[in-house]
Amino acid sequence: MAQDKQLSESLEDYLEIILELEKGNKVARVKDIAEKMGIQSGSVTSALKNLAEKKLINYEPYSYITLTESGMAIAKEMNMRHVVIQDFLSRVLQIDEKQADETACRMEHTLDKKSFGMIVQFIKFIDECPRTGDGWKQAFIHSCKPDADGWKKCKACLSQCSEKLK
Amino acid sequence: MAQDKQLSESLEDYLEIILELEKGNKVARVKDIAEKMGIQSGSVTSALKNLAEKKLINYEPYSYITLTESGMAIAKEMNMRHVVIQDFLSRVLQIDEKQADETACRMEHTLDKKSFGMIVQFIKFIDECPRTGDGWKQAFIHSCKPDADGWKKCKACLSQCSEKLK
DNA sequence: AATAAATGTTTGGTTAATATAACATTTATG
DNA sequence: CATAAATGTTATATTAACCAAACATTTATT
C-alpha cells in the first residue's frame, strides 16, 4: 500500500532538513529551510506544496511545518544513510569531516538499498573482526603515506593482531 | 588553462557512452547513443551540440561522433571510476553484477576526487594486506549469512592468515 | 492598536534535460 | 539511379528546480 513513488533527491533533502530542524527547534520554518539549503524562500514554498500533496509533511500557508509519519520515515532513512556513509568516509577512508559530509549528502541518494545494507555490514565487520579492527585501520592509514614501506612490518602487525585472540 | 567547468552528470554520461561506442564500433552514432541511454534521438542531438560547443566532441550535423582529447580525458576518467566502483561493489560487497553496474553508474558522478582516490587505495590494501585478502573476504561473506556463527572460527581463521607470512 | 520588520507566498522568469512529431538527409535496395 | 527505409535534425512542449521581485500575512515594537 505504500506510495513508493521514488522521490527526487531534492525532495529527499527537504525532508531530511525538516527533520533536523524539528529536532533542534521543535518545528521547521520556511526561512530556516531556505537558509540550510542555500536557496530562496520562494523555492521552498513550492517544494513544500509538493511535499504536502504527497502527504509527506503537514503544511498550510504561513503555518509551521512538520513531517507526517511517512515523511518522517523517509527523513530518518536519509539521515541514517547520511550518518553511515559519513562514518565510512571519515573513519575508514580518512576523509576530512567537511568533505565526508558533502559527499555523504550526495551518496545517500545514489546508493541502492542492497549496497547500502552491505556497507553497514562491512563497516561492522571491519570494526569487529580480529583480523581487521583498529590495528588494521592504522596499517591502512600508514600504507597511504608517501613513505609507506610496503609489507615490511607485516610480521609485527600480524602477531599484534594474534594477541587479540587470547 | 583547463576549462574546469564542472560537467553535468548527464553530459558526463554522454561522453562515457561515446567512448564505449568508439571502442566497439570505432565511431559513435546518434541512434546508438539514444539506445544506450534509453532516450529519444532528438534529445541526443541537443546534447551533442552542447558537447561540441564545449569542445568535448567532434560533431557536425549528420556526421559520426568522436571524442576530442579533452572529451576523451573525461570519458576515460568516468570509465575508470565506473570500473573501480563496480569492482568494489561486486567483489568486496558482493553486490550482483547488474545492480553493481547501475549503482556504479550513479556513484561515479557523486564521489569527490579524494574519496574516490581513497577507495582505490582501500581496495588495494584489502587485497594485498596479509591480514585481509581473500580469506578475510570469505569471512566477511560468511558473517553476512543468516546462520553466521559470530567469532567462533576466529582462531582457525587467524592462524590460516598467519600462514601467509611464512 | 498602528505600523514597522520579519517572514511567507505568488507570479513570472530561466535552465537543463527530456519528449514528440514533422522534416531533412543519408544509405540501402529494386 | 530512383525511391524506400533508416537515421538524424529541428521546432515546440513539458517538467523539475530554481531565482527575483512584487505582494500578503504574521509578529514585534512603540
Image (spheres, coloured by chain):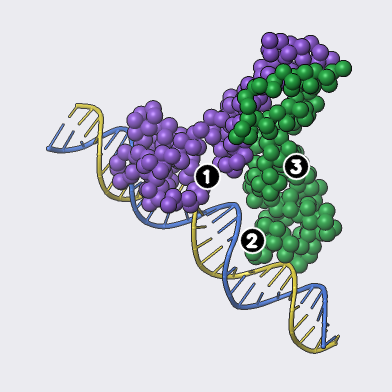
Chain colours: A purple, B green, C blue, D yellow
Compared to B13, does C28 lie above or below?
A: below
Across the whole image, how many numbered discs are drawn on residues? Answer: 3
Residue furthest to the right in view is B166
- Tell me the element at label 1: helix
- Tell me the element at label 3: helix
Q: Dot 1 surroundings within 10 Å: few (below 14), some, or many (20 or more)?
A: few
From the image, tell me which residue sits under label 1: A9
Q: Dot 2 surroundings within 10 Å: few (below 14), some, or many (20 or more)?
A: few
- Residue at 78 percent across and 53 percent down: it is B20
From the image, tell me which residue sits under label 3: B83
Q: Position of residue A128 (x, y in %)?
A: 63, 21
Q: Position of residue A4 (x, y in %)?
A: 48, 50
Q: Is residue B55 visible?
A: no
Q: CA distance from mark 1 to mark 3?
A: 24 Å
From the image, tell me which residue sits under label 2: B39
Q: Position of residue A83 (x, y in %)?
A: 53, 29
Q: Earlier in the sequence, mark 3 or mark 2?
A: 2
Which amino acid type is shown beneath numbered disc 3? Val
Q: Nearer the viewer, residue B128 or B158?
A: B158
Q: Dot 3 surroundings within 10 Å: few (below 14), some, or many (20 or more)?
A: some
Q: CA distance from mark 2 to mark 1?
A: 21 Å
Tell me the chain of label 1.
A
On screen, residue A36 versus residue B134, left or right, reads left
